[in-house]
Image (cartoon, grey):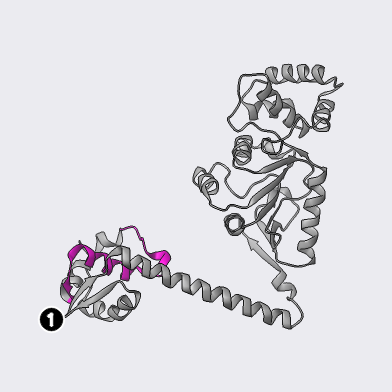
Amino acid sequence: MGKGNMGQQRRLLEGLGVTVAEETAYRALLRHGPATLSELAAETGSSAAAIRRMLPRLEDLGLISRVAGRPLRLVATPPTIAIDILVARRQEELTHSRAAAALLATEVADRGGPHPEEVLEVVTGRDAVARRYLQLERNATREMLVLVHPPYAVDISDDRENRRRAARQGAPITRGIYSPLAFEQPGMLAHTRRAIADGEQARLGQVPVKLAIADARTAILPLVSDEDRAVESALVVHPSALLDALVGLFETLWRAAVPLRLTPDGLEEDRRGPDEEVLALLAAGMKDDAIARQLGLSPRTVQRRVQVLCERLGARTRFHAGYLAAHNDLLVTKGQE
């Protein structure tokens, strides 16, 4: 296989610290079998001198070994063995890195605590904000606290990311408070329904600012209050009195919020399922047109159901119906009953 085709191969070992050239040589040797330097060079489209310069690194990685005799011939380590070696090396590096982080943290503590620039981190650009949020979420091990309010930096319709989140082993508990405006975006209700089915504890309440807190150790929130620019930059807060205040803010809002019930299997045509979702969105303060868009119903159907619910609950207005539903604990999420 020539050099041009080799460059188009999908990289498989990048995450284990193997360069493009090293992986190309290893995979060529796997296909070819034991080979001399010139044979391997021809197979990769490289030069024998370049392969020779690469040999110490390939041997150090455990990807190849030398066959006894002359001329020099190389053989590839079986993939199952080679990958185990690479993974073990990377795990050892991570262990050393964690130990180094602990030692560096003690140096910070010895000087009387972190400096202000170590407490606050500014992230600029919508894509960078989305990546930083996902990194925060993926690194969380115990609990994610989220105040949900549009606009959103992360694409909620990203099925691949949603599947990854649902399949994650040892995922943290998520508690989310949704603003009445959270469900104005198409698809947000379905996204929230999936999250609740996957174990999220969701409530409806006042959300003064977008916020996410991972393991009570790192928080991310908009840098500016202008909603049109809320996802263009973000402030990341590390352990500090400010972070403690943000955690306290969330807990205060959580106690005041009302539980949200969304059926995980979609809308059912019985009376209970759709009515509960209508009640939940009423309690969120959404208008009939917005409820209709989220539930895939006509505005007239929503108006009719709201009228029936008001009569059943003895409510004077649609807002009173939402209040009574919350007050009488009719919006309890499955799994919180």
Quadrant, the C terminus: top right
Q: Where are the magenta residues, as a range?
A: 9-37
| Residue 277 rendering spot, x and y as whole percentages | 69, 28
Judging depth in this view, the residue of 301 and 313 nearest the camera is 313
Quadrant, the N terminus: bottom left
Residue 15 image-quadrant placement: bottom left
Left or right, 301 with respect to 19, comes to: right
Residue 10 image-quadrant placement: bottom left
Q: Residue at x 82, y 30 (%)?
A: 328
Q: Is residue 5 above or below residue 41?
A: above
Judging depth in this view, the residue of 213 and 265 nearest the camera is 265
Q: Residue at x 70, y 36 (%)?
A: 333
- For badge 1, the amino acid type reads Pro
| Residue 236 rendering spot, x and y as whole percentages | 68, 62
Q: Is residue 311 above or below residue 227?
A: above
The number of numbered discs placed on residues in the rendered structure image is 1
| Residue 71 rendering spot, x and y as whole percentages | 13, 81
What residue does disc 1 label? 71
Q: Residue at x 63, y 39 (%)?
A: 196
Q: Please, what secondary structure does the residue beneath circle 1 have?
A: loop
As for residue 318 lying within the magenta part, the answer is: no
